Amino acid sequence: MDAVSRGREPEGLLGDIKALFSEGGTLRGAADLRQAVRVLLVKPGVQALLLYRLYRWLHVRGLRLLPEILARLNYFLTGAEIDPGAEIGPGCRIWHTAGVTIGRGVKIGRDVWILHNVTLGGRGASPFDPGEEGYPRVGDGAILYTGVTVLGNVEIGPGAVIGAHSLVLDDVPAGSLAYGVPAKVVKRPGRH
């Protein structure tokens, strides 16, 4: 996440393009212009990240209104709500954009997989809870399955897997499997 936090978005864009042609990516084999154009035209996850890279680049350079407008356009076109202040590392894959929400202070590492209806955001204040400051940090290679919600100052370790429809309110160690409401770690690396 270090390169992302310094605002070097071209690495993010290049990482996204490499991920399209990697094992487990949307495209297979050598780059083919026709395939690449097809993916750009019909895959909302790819479109959402490319548009995010553009408005994030503008945001890092001090523009505020235009990135916010482009973020709204991104939501309208793809269904993914990604704040310009979020930091997303290269190679991120949003497989299905419907309902994906990534808040302002969220930090996502390299090669993270995000499925539909995933929410990453802060814990806002309410009459029942004063809330807490901070946003989720998602480590490299983590997988967030359908319907996962991660709220507050929470760290998802590198390579962690969060099961479908889980509510994550506490840290998840690297390489672990967690699921449930609230999510609990059910498997740690090296333990069966």
Image (spheres, rainbow, N blue to C red):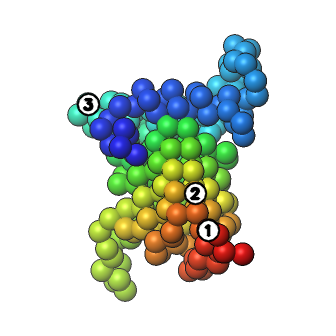
Residue 159: which numbered mark, if any? 2
**Residue underneath mark 3:** 61
Query: Marks 3 and 2: CB-CB under 8 Å?
Result: no
Cα distance between the residues tagged 3 and 1: 40 Å
* Identity of the residue drawn at 40% across and 46% down: 1
Q: Which quadrant, please, contains the C terminus?
A: bottom right
Type of amino acid at the residue the image marks with label 3? Arg
| Sooner in the amino-acid sequence: mark 3 or mark 2 | 3
Percent position (x, y) of residue 80? 55, 46
What secondary structure is found at the residue carrying circle 2? loop
Percent position (x, y) of residue 112? 56, 48
Residue 189: which numbered mark, if any? 1
Q: Closer to us: mark 3 or mark 1?
A: 1
Residue 119: which numbered mark, if any? none
Q: Closer to us: mark 1 or mark 2?
A: 1
Task: Identify whether 100 is placed above or below 24.
Answer: below
Type of amino acid at the residue the image marks with label 2? Gly
